[in-house]
Amino acid sequence: MARISYIDATCVYPGAAAPSVAQLNLEVEDGEFMVLVGPSGSGKSTALRMLAGLEPVSAGEIQIDGSDVSRRPPKDRDIAMVFQNYALYPHMSVGDNMGFALKLRGTPKAERDTKVREAAKLLDLEHLLDRKPKALSGGQRQRVAMGRAIVREPSVFLMDEPLSNLDAKLRVETRANIASLQARLGTTTIYVTHDQVEAMTMGHRVAVLHNGHLQQVDTPRSLYDSPCNLFVAGFIGSPAMNLREARLTAEGAQLGGAPLALPQDLRARLSGASSLMVGIRPEAAAVAPAGAPGALRLTVTLVEELGADAYVYGQLEGDQPQQRPWVLRVEGRDVPRLGETLSFTVAQQAAHFFDAASGERLS
């Protein structure tokens, strides 16, 4: 196991106008499962590959257990990487694929076979050791790729979107297996994904990146409850947080034709401002009778029925036609009809407030 430190780590590709990763400062504790998440181009895979030695560290450094590895070749970093495309040798059996790195090291065959069998038992691959990769399903191939990493007994596992080639049901099953396996092995793991649901369900902590910059790193629950800025608020959560710019009035923030009360300390900080951004999670609203005091009105444009719950999409009163639909989560057995106008209320403590100019969290 190992402790990982990114210290002002920067990667600038030749000819690029901006760094792919800019002054990343991130600590990964010994035995921690850290997830790097962000949209395409956010720098998450580059950050992982910098640690692996597959991309250059243009400035700053990366440490493993306090030792700078920024200039070390990949083979000297004691890491094992699981790739998106599995990278299995098609002409080798499952057992030979899993033991190939040990063979290159010169590990005796008896010891190699023992380690392969132990890893195969851990991953339920014992009955597949003699098969070739082409005879395996996608989930089985992914487990073989993980087994190949496990037999090396590295200090760090690196996983670069390992589930992206699997179907939705298998992704859910495999992500649970990976999280369980990491908990049993206790190996420091850095996992890259663009899927924030994966990030929230697997990581001890999650680091959110955007345009090469670290936005926030925290536990999944803290990211969801207290996003530090508008990007994190809009990225973490499925469906995403509802965000609207609200005009400030004497009564509070004017949202969708109704005033939303603001905390007293926030009102004092907003002296002189004309607006702020309001964020409300889909589950934070309560359907209310028409005409209820302080109720917001939503014209329904789409209903997604999910069984116990349903998501209602619509236009908030005062919305522009091009604005992203507002989303409510409602009881799945009593859903509104398309075109219906729905009234709902929001408690002040359920609202998130952000600076309209900088996007930084206010409350």
Image (cartoon, helix red, strand yellow):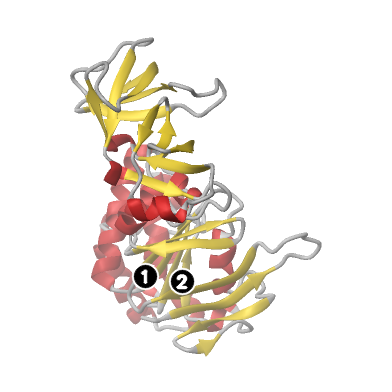
**Residue reaching furthest front?**
250
Please indicate, yes or no, whether residue 244 appears anywhere in the rendered image: no
Badge 2 amino acid: Ala
Please indicate, yes or no, whether residue 58 appears anywhere in the rendered image: yes
Quarter where residue 306 is shown: top left
Tell me whether circle 2 and circle 1 mark residues in contact (CB < 8 Å).
yes
**Residue reaching furthest bottom?**
67
From the viewer's side, name the closer residue of 215 and 352. 352
**Residue reaching furthest right?**
15
How far apart in space, not on screen, are marks 2 and 1 (Cα)? Answer: 8 Å
Residue at the (41%, 43%) spot, across then down? 166
From the viewer's side, name the closer residue of 352 and 272. 272
Q: Please give the residue where the numbered disc 2 appears in the rendered image.
A: 80
Q: Which mark is residue 150?
A: 1
Quarter where residue 76 is shown: bottom right
Label 1 Cα crowd, 10 Å radius (few <14 / some 14-19 / many 20+): many
Choose the circle earlier in sequence order: 2 or 1: 2
Above or below, 115 against 360 in this view is below
Counting from the top left corner in percent of width and height, residue 240 is at 41, 39
Identify the secondary structure beneath mark 1. Answer: helix
Q: Quadrant of the C terminus?
A: bottom left
Counting from the top left corner in percent of width and height, residue 202 is at 32, 57
Residue at the (64%, 72%) spot, across then down? 10
Number of numbered tags placed on the structure image: 2
Q: Is residue 289 left or right of residue 191?
A: left
